[in-house]
Image: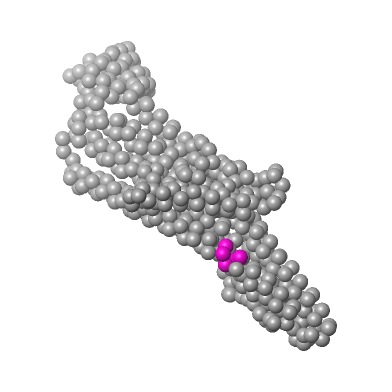
């Protein structure tokens, strides 16, 4: 078999493993609650469509669209009605007769003028192009923000599920220590263990109860975060479904992310806006041609007694042949375009970095979860054997308590690792600008979330005998 054939089989096997593992993880994260559930799709859609910032962002996009539509007036005629009334006195004997010269008169005049721009140095065209690019940029920004909001919602959802499971682990840890305490009390009452053994197991039981308090506080915080993001309390029967069609290589992940990134598309529109703005700004260097027509009627105008009226039609040309500072203006516009292009290159690097780091986290989470699952199994077996040996008198109480502590710590870490693996799968979709589409969120429903900084609740505390420090999802 060729090396290429072997490689394809290995990748195929890896794909099957990843999907099977993700499916198993989805089942692990699903609690045995009622089926009437707050499913992930509904939670994400609620977050994306009802968040207050979404309404503001949708209004911004609509305003950008209306600002584009209002430019239609630049291509339509202008109709101006003007009127004038006032007192005039002229001293012009060469033009006025003796009856009108130096005579004070009340002049009245009214007129109607129509004006149509024939050529304006392409200012109108560039304004339309710039506003269209601005609208596209707003839409791409809106879509990119929807990925952020959807990811925040997924994160909040998984965190609630995770904390529910962590609370179960902490509660089982207390139950386990109470069981050990009953055995120790029987042995102390029977004179087979010293009284100090009772105090030792009570101290461990109190430590376990304190550990559960930390988890309860963290779970309450996760519920508060859920309400802030989703807009309602967590439901029952929450579970995290598996994600399909993930990239199989880091290179594929990077290519997809760069190709689909809404941030890159938005930055491309900003470059276009600077170029069109250059055309708008320099339009005054070209001729300005307008077609004008009008009618006018008045009485006692310019010192002449009686009524008069006239009409006119013609073409007007204005051309500013010279104005200072034009060269500096052109160079400033070039620098603005270079600035936008450099900003886009910066975003390319950021998107590439995010794609690579997301891929790295995903693969690390797979390996971590597999190893922790094995550790959990080994720690459980060790704890059970130590208890059997303790009853037989071949193991000390300290050995049993230490084994139980090890099992709790490993199981606690394993739950967070499984949640991190689930979250990393959805973050891979977000890095490719595909997360909102997975939940069938229409662009019109997308809200704007201005930052990408929200992360899972992480409880910071000194190391304790039972490690209840909850890692952030990554």
Please give the name of the residue rendered at 29% of the width and 17% of the height, measured from the top-left corner: 293
Query: In the figure, 179 relative to 244: above or below?
Result: below
User: Which residue ends up furthest to the front in the rendered image?
Assistant: 1
Query: In the figure, 134 relative to 363: above or below?
Result: above
Total labels: the figure holds 0
Please give the name of the residue rendered at 20% of the width and 18% of the height, measured from the top-left corner: 95
Please give the name of the residue rendered at 40% of the width and 37% of the height, measured from the top-left corner: 135
> Which contiguous range is marked in magenta?
373-377
Please give the name of the residue rendered at 53% of the width and 64% of the height, measured from the top-left corner: 371
Task: Residue 254: tell me if it is visible.
Answer: no
Please state if 374 lies on the left or on the right of 294 as rendered: right
- Whether residue 192 appears in magenta in the rendering, the answer is no
Task: From the top left corner, tell me how far across and down residue 4 is, in percent.
Answer: 34, 49
Task: From the top left corner, tell me how far across and down residue 292 is, in percent.
Answer: 27, 20
Please state if 410 lies on the left or on the right of 77 as rendered: right
Query: In the figure, 113 relative to 280: above or below?
Result: above
Task: From the top left corner, tell me how far across and down residue 86 is, in percent.
Answer: 36, 24
């Amino acid at each position: 078999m060729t090396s290429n054939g072997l490689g394809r089989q290995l990748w195929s096997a890896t794909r099957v493993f990843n999907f099977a593992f993700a499916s198993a993880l989805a089942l692990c994260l699903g609690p045995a609650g009622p089926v009437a559930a707050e499913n992930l799709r509904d939670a994400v859609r609620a977050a994306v469509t009802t968040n207050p910032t979404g309404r503001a962002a949708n209004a911004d996009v609509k305003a950008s669209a209306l600002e584009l539509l209002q430019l239609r007036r630049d291509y339509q005629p202008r109709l101006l009605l003007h009127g004038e009334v006032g007192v005039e006195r002229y001293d012009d004997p060469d033009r006025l007769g003796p009856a009108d010269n130096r005579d004070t008169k009340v002049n009245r005049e009214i007129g109607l003028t129509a004006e149509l721009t024939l050529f304006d140095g392409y200012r109108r065209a560039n304004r339309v192009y710039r506003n269209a690019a601005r609208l596209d940029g707003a839409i791409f920004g809106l879509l990119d923000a929807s990925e952020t909001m959807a990811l925040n919602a997924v994160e909040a959802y998984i965190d609630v599920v995770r904390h529910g499971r962590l609370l179960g682990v902490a509660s089982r840890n207390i139950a386990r220590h109470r069981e050990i305490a009953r055995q120790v009390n029987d042995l102390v009452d029977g004179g087979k263990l010293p009284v100090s053994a009772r105090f030792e197991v009570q101290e461990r039981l109190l430590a376990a109860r304190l550990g559960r308090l930390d988890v309860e506080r963290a779970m309450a915080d996760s519920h508060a975060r859920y309400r802030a993001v989703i807009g309602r309390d967590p439901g029952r029967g929450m579970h995290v479904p598996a994600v399909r069609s993930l990239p199989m290589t880091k290179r594929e992940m990077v290519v997809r992310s760069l190709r689909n990134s809404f941030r890159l598309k938005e930055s491309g529109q900003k470059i276009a806006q600077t170029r069109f703005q250059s055309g708008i700004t320099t339009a005054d260097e070209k001729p300005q041609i307008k077609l004008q027509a009008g009618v006018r009627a008045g009485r006692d105008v310019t010192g002449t007694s009686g009524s008069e009226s006239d009409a006119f039609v013609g073409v007007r040309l204005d051309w500013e042949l010279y104005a200072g500072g034009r060269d500096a203006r052109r160079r400033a516009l070039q620098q603005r375009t270079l600035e936008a292009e450099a900003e886009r290159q910066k975003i390319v690097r950021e998107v590439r970095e995010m794609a690579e780091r997301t891929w790295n986290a995903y693969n690390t989470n797979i390996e971590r979860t597999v190893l922790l699952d094995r550790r959990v199994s080994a720690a459980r077996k060790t704890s059970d054997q130590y208890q059997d040996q303790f009853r037989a008198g071949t193991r000390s109480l300290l050995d049993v308590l230490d084994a139980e502590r090890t099992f709790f710590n490993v199981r606690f870490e394993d739950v967070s690792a499984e949640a991190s693996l689930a979250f990393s799968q959805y973050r891979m979709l977000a890095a490719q600008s595909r997360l909102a589409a997975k939940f069938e969120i229409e662009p019109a429903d997308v809200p704007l979330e201005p930052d990408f900084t929200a992360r899972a609740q992480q409880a910071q505390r000194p190391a304790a005998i039972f490690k209840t420090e909850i890692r952030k999802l990554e």
